[in-house]
Amino acid sequence: MNICQLPATELARLLRVKTISARDVVSAHLSRIDAVNPKVNAIVTLTADEAMTEARAADERLANGEPVGLLHGLPIAHKDLQETRGVRTTFGSPIFHDYVPRQDSPTVERLKRAGAITVGKTNTPEFGAGSQTFNPVFGATLNPYDLTKTCGGSSGGAAVALACGMLPIADGTDMGGSLRNPAAFCGVVGMRRAVRHEHGSKPLASWELLSVDGPMARTAADVALLLAAMAGPAMAISGLPAHSAGPALPGRAALERDFRGSRIAWSIEFGQLPFDPRVLAVVDAQHSVFESIGCTVEEASPDFSGADEVFKTLRAQAFVNIRGDIVKRHRALVKETILDEIARGERLTTADVDLAERGRVDLRLRACRFMERYEFFVLPTTQVPPFNVNDPFVREINGVPMASYIDWMRSCYYISTIGYPAISVPCGFTADGLPVGLQIVGRDGDDWGVLQLAHAFERARGPFRAPPM
C-alpha cells in the first residue's frame, strides 16, 4: 500500500478503522517530501518533528475512544499567506522574512480542530499577487510535469505538493483564480467556494468578497471532505448536505448523482476572450464526456461585459485596505506590480468604487438570469497552458497583448466578480504533456452541485496521469 497515492477520503477511512496510524501517514508523507521537494520547492517551511509529535497524540486520542474530527491524522501544509502559531509565515515577502505569528488564522485553527496535522507551509507569490509562484524569500516553485514551467499561483506550492504526493489535502486562497489556476497547471482539483455575503450579522463590502479560502486535493471527493472541515457547521448554507459537517465522512457515495437532463452551457470561447489553441483543443474534447453522463450541453456564455473594470477596481481597493500601510513603510522591499496595484487603489474615488459596486450587482443579476436556464456552465480554467517559469506573467495570447500582469487570468477572475462556486478539474494534456483544467461554475450557493458534477466528470474521464516524480 503506497500511502502517498491514496485519496484523502480513503486515508481518513483507514485511519478511523485503525488499519493505519497517523504516525504511518505523517511519516510516509514526510519521507515523500524529503525525496521530492528539493526538485520542485513547493513546501518552504517544514515542521517535521512537531508533526510526528502531533501524530502520536492523534493516535492516542483515537485509541482512548476520544472524538476525532473529519481530518483526523491527515497531514496538511498551509499556504504561506495563512498565519500559523509558532511557525514562520512570510507572505512571500522580505518584510516578513522572520515573522512568527502568535496565533493561527481562522482557517488554520478550524483545520487543526478537525484533526489535520500541520507539516509545514507552501510557497506563494509575494502577498499572493499574481498567478506565478515565485518570491524573493524562497524563489520559484516548479511545475512537476515540466520543471522549466510555472506551476501557476498563487496557491502554487499547494498544487505542486498535492500533484507530487507530498500532501493528500491543502488549503489555498482565491481572489482572481489562485486556487483554480495552479490546480489546472498541476493536474489537481481546486475549488473557489460560494461567497457568503455576511460575516455574522455584518454585511461585507464587495472588496471583502473577492478573496476566499478554499480546498485543494487530487479528487472532487477529497475536496468535499476538506471543504466540509474548513467551513464547519455553516457549510449547509453553501449547499452541502447538513450531515457532511458532522461525524460522518462526506465521501464518494454522497457525491453520486444522476445528471440525465441537467443543462450545461458550454462556454468554450468565454466572452470572446483570447485562448491558446492548445487549451481550447483539450477542453473542447471533453464535450462528449458531459454528454456521456446524461447532460444536455448547449453552446452559450453568460454576459460578463464590465467584469474587467469591476474586478480591477475592487482588487485595487482590497490591496489598499489589506496591504496599503505595510507597503508604504517598506516600498523598497515590494515588487513593482504590487506598488502599481496600491497606487491604483489610492487613486480610486468614491464614485469609482460605487460604480464597481453597482457593476458587480448587475453582473450577479445577469448571471442569475442566465442560470435560470442552465444549472452549470463549463469553460477553460486558464487561457494558456503552463508557461516558462522565468516569465513573471503572460504578455500576449494569440497575438493579443495583455495590458497588465493579471489580464491573462480573465477566465478565472470574471467568475470571482459574481461570487458563484467554481472548481477546476484536470481534463487532459497538451501535445507536449502539460496539464489542462476545465472550470465548472454552478448556481449561486450550490457548492455541492459543483462538487457532484466534478465527481461525475472525473469518473467518466478516467484516471489522470501523475507527474513523473
Image (cartoon, rainbow, N blue to C red):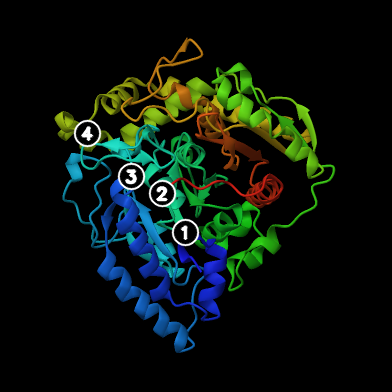
Q: Amino acid at mark 2?
A: Met
Circle 2 crowding by C-alpha within 10 Å: few under 14, some 14–19, many from 20? few
Label 1 – label 4 distance at C-alpha: 35 Å
Residue, disc 1: 168
| Residue shown at 60% from the left, 57% from the top | 221
Q: Amino acid at mark 3?
A: Val
Of the two numbered discs 2 and 3 on the same chain, state the one appearing first in sequence: 3
**Comparing labels 2 and 3, the label whose residue is closer to the camera:** 2
- Secondary structure, mark 4, is helix
Residue, disc 3: 40
Hey, which residue is sitting farthest bottom in the picture? 64
Q: Position of residue 194 (x, y in %)?
A: 57, 45
Any mark on residue 469, and which? 2
Of the two numbered discs 3 and 4 on the same chain, state the one appearing first in sequence: 3
Label 2 – label 3 distance at C-alpha: 10 Å
Tell me the quarter of the picture where residue 324 sits.
Answer: top left
Q: Is residue 279 left or right of residue 107?
A: right
User: Can residue 241 be seen?
Assistant: yes
Label 2 – label 4 distance at C-alpha: 38 Å
Label 3 – label 4 distance at C-alpha: 29 Å
Q: Is residue 289 above or below residue 20?
A: above
Residue, disc 4: 327
**Comparing labels 1 and 4, the label whose residue is closer to the camera:** 1
**Comparing labels 1 and 3, the label whose residue is closer to the camera:** 3
Q: Amino acid at mark 1?
A: Pro
Q: Position of residue 404 (x, y in %)?
A: 39, 19
- Secondary structure, mark 2, is loop
Label 2 – label 1 distance at C-alpha: 16 Å
